[in-house]
């Protein structure tokens, strides 16, 4: 069995030996233009040329959860695209989002600044009932985040394409219930895949439907948010702040207003990293299942875009 690996930004020097160790009977090679045809490709943001040349693939593995970069390419017909299915990401995402929610709710930013200035002052405790958290996207990551936030006894809302029932989460579904979801939420966490339907979803109209004093946490993709609309709503006071891990252009260009905005907290697309050993173990196990003709989780519906 032949496997090719390509990544636009992961460390191939570490992935190739890891894949070879997990797939001892396979010939695993770094993909280069003209590489022999393989049975499986393991990729992150590959060039179109890889997909055009690899005409005998049994499956295409994406070494991330989001497949938006792949969906922009011409995919080989009939070849299953398989994304990472958690692989250690959901606990990282739960940590990141709980940290951002609690940091805002407990006003830790204000306390940090007070302490830096030698000021010993208390803020009035806030009621978590006034800070309902809404999670856009209730998939592998969103459902885990909703569960983690609910453990801190915040009211939790969730929004998905199809209707769901999750313990401790008030579930909304579909376009018809989006406004009600936003109106019921004060802290809105975006964990949607980036698709035709979800691009620019958080524009001025939607963002202004979040409760007054709202807070936005974007850990999905930058293009879910219209940057200028978010900035305008922060400046008008409708939104109290935002924590942003993902951006339309990454790295975030120097001079972008997010860098200096006092109400915006930034991180460099790090909320849930691809963990190499967990991911390789998952991909190797799925290759073994496919070779036996078994079903695997994480197959992308390419028409739907996620
Ligand atoms: P997932 O399991 O595919 O879940 C996607 C969720 O979004 C599902 O609940 C789905 O609804 C919902 N959804 C999709 N389109 C929708 C629409 N038009 N309207 C309403 N709901 C919609 O994905 P995941 O594994 O949780 O990952 C989510 C995203 O997180 C990824 O696509 C990726 O972009 C991002 N991500 C970011 C990082 C980071 O470090 N920042 C790391 C990993 C992933 P249904 O359940 O009804 O299908
Ligand atoms: C990271 O952003 C991923 O989609 O895995």
Image (spheres, rainbow, N blue to C red):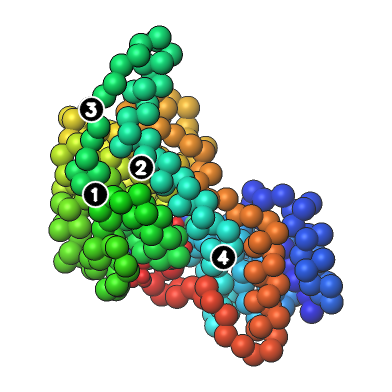
**Label 2 packing within 10 angstroms: few (<14), some (14-19), many (20+):** many
Residue under label 3: 124
Closer to the camera, 239 or 144? Answer: 144
- Asked which secondary structure carries label 2, the reply is helix
Residue located 41% across and 75% down the image: 303
Find out whether the residues at labels 3 and 4 contact each other: C-beta distance under 8 Å.
no
In what quadrant of the picture does the C terminus appear? bottom left
Residue under label 1: 132
Question: Marks 4 and 1: which is nearer the front?
Answer: 1
Task: Determine which quarter of the picture holds residue 283.
Answer: bottom right
**Label 4 packing within 10 angstroms: few (<14), some (14-19), many (20+):** many
Residue under label 2: 101
Mark 3 or mark 4: which comes first in sequence?
Answer: 4
Mark 4 or mark 1: which comes first in sequence?
Answer: 4
Separation of disc 2 and disc 1 at Cα? 10 Å
Find out whether the residues at labels 4 and 2 contact each other: C-beta distance under 8 Å.
no
Residue under label 4: 84
Task: Determine which quarter of the picture holds residue 126.
Answer: top left
Residue 17 relative to residue 142: left or right: right
């Amino acid at each position: 069995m032949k496997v090719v690996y390509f990544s636009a930004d992961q460390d191939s020097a570490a992935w190739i030996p890891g894949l070879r160790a997990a797939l001892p009977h396979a010939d695993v090679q770094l993909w280069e233009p003209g590489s022999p045809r393989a049975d499986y490709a393991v990729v992150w943001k590959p060039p179109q040329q890889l997909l055009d040349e690899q005409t005998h693939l049994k499956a295409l593995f994406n070494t991330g959860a989001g497949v938006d970069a792949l969906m922009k390419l011409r995919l080989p017909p009939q070849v299953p695209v398989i994304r990472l299915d958690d692989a250690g990401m959901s606990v990282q995402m739960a940590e990141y989002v709980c940290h951002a929610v609690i940091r805002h709710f407990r006003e830790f930013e204000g306390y940090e600044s007070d302490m830096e200035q030698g000021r010993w002052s208390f803020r009035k405790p806030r009621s978590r009932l006034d800070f309902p958290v809404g999670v856009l996207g209730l998939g592998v990551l969103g459902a885990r985040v909703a569960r983690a936030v609910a453990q801190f006894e915040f009211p939790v809302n969730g929004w998905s394409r199809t209707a769901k029932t999750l313990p401790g989460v008030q579930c909304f579904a579909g376009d018809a219930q989006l406004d009600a979801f936003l109106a019921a939420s004060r802290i809105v966490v975006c964990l949607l895949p980036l698709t035709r339907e979800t691009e620019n979803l958080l524009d001025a109209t939607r963002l202004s439907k979040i409760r007054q004093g709202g807070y936005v946490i974007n850990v999905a993709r930058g293009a879910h948010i219209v940057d200028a609309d978010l900035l305008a709503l922060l400046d008008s006071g409708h939104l109290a702040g935002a924590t942003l891990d993902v951006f339309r252009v990454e790295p975030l260009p120097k001079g972008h207003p997010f860098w200096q905005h006092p109400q915006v907290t930034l991180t460099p697309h790090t909320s849930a990293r691809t963990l190499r050993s967990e991911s390789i173990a998952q991909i190797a196990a799925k290759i073994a299942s496919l070779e036996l003709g078994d079903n695997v989780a994480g197959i992308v519906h390419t028409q739907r875009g996620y």
